[in-house]
């Protein structure tokens, strides 16, 4: 606020808006956003994929329903879908039916309690990181 009041916002000697490491990417011409939806459907209820991923709403039924292609193992990385996904109670019950689950999370939560193995994430000092997504929004 002090930089705004003194006229030093985005000026030398004040707070500068950083330039993003990567510029905006050109979008393909025509309809859509450059990818195709629904190239394949979920096994149980026919949810369409988006960028090779199914919606989280399909996870419980894909674990519960027996047959070819049933989800039998899961790796959760810093996620708590039991708390954040639709119908979390059903997903909570379904996760107990997995053959194997690994959770990489610093906390034991509603989802990671079902994991057969809980691993800690690497500390920030041990991993390189450059924020491509939010660098342009920093002040």
Image (cartoon, rainbow, N blue to C red):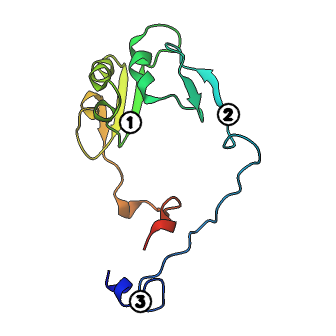
Q: Please, what secondary structure does the residue beneath circle 3 have?
A: loop
Name the residue carrying label 1.
76
The residue indicated by pointer 2 is 36
Q: Is residue 33 above or below residue 46?
A: below
Quarter assignment of residue 50: top right
Q: Quick check: 100 left or right of 10?
A: left
Please tell me whether mark 2 sits on a helix, a strand or a loop: loop
Q: Give the mark count.
A: 3
Residue nearest the observer in this picture, 30 or 139: 30
Residue 92 position in % (x across, y down): 28, 23
Instruction: Name the mark nearer the viewer: 3 or 2.
Output: 3
Query: Residue 7's mark?
Result: 3
The earlier-in-sequence mark between 1 and 2 is: 2
- Residue 22: image x %, image y %? 61, 65
* Quadrant including the C terminus: bottom left
Quadrant position of residue 56? top left
Q: From this viewpoint, which residue is outermost toward the right?
A: 29
**Residue at mark 3 to residue at mark 2: CA–CA distance:** 47 Å
Residue drawn at 42 percent across, 10 percent down: 65
- Mark nearest the camera among 1 and 3 is 3
Q: CA distance from mark 1 to mark 2?
A: 26 Å
Residue located at (31% from left, 46% from top): 120
The residue positioned 57% from the left and 28% from the top of the image is 49
Q: Residue at x 47, y 15 (%)?
A: 70
Q: Earlier in the sequence, mark 1 or mark 3?
A: 3
In this view, the mark in front (1 or 2) = 2
Q: CB atoms at circles 3 and 2 under 8 Å apart?
A: no
Q: Is residue 119 left or right of residue 70?
A: left
- Residue 126 x, y percent position in the rendering: 39, 61
């Amino acid at each position: 606020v002090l930089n705004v009041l003194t006229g030093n916002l985005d000026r030398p000697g004040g707070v500068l808006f950083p330039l993003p490491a990567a510029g905006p990417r050109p979008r393909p011409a025509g309809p859509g956003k450059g990818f195709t939806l629904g190239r394949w459907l979920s096994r149980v209820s026919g949810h369409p994929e988006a960028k090779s991923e199914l919606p989280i709403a399909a996870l419980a039924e894909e674990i519960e329903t027996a047959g070819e292609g049933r989800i039998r193992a899961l790796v959760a990385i810093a996620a708590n879908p039991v708390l954040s996904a639709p119908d979390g109670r059903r997903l909570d019950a379904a996760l107990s039916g997995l053959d194997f689950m690994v959770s990489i999370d610093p906390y034991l939560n509603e989802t990671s309690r079902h994991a057969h193995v809980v691993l800690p994430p690497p500390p920030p000092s041990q991993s390189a990181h450059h924020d491509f997504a939010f660098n342009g929004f920093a002040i």
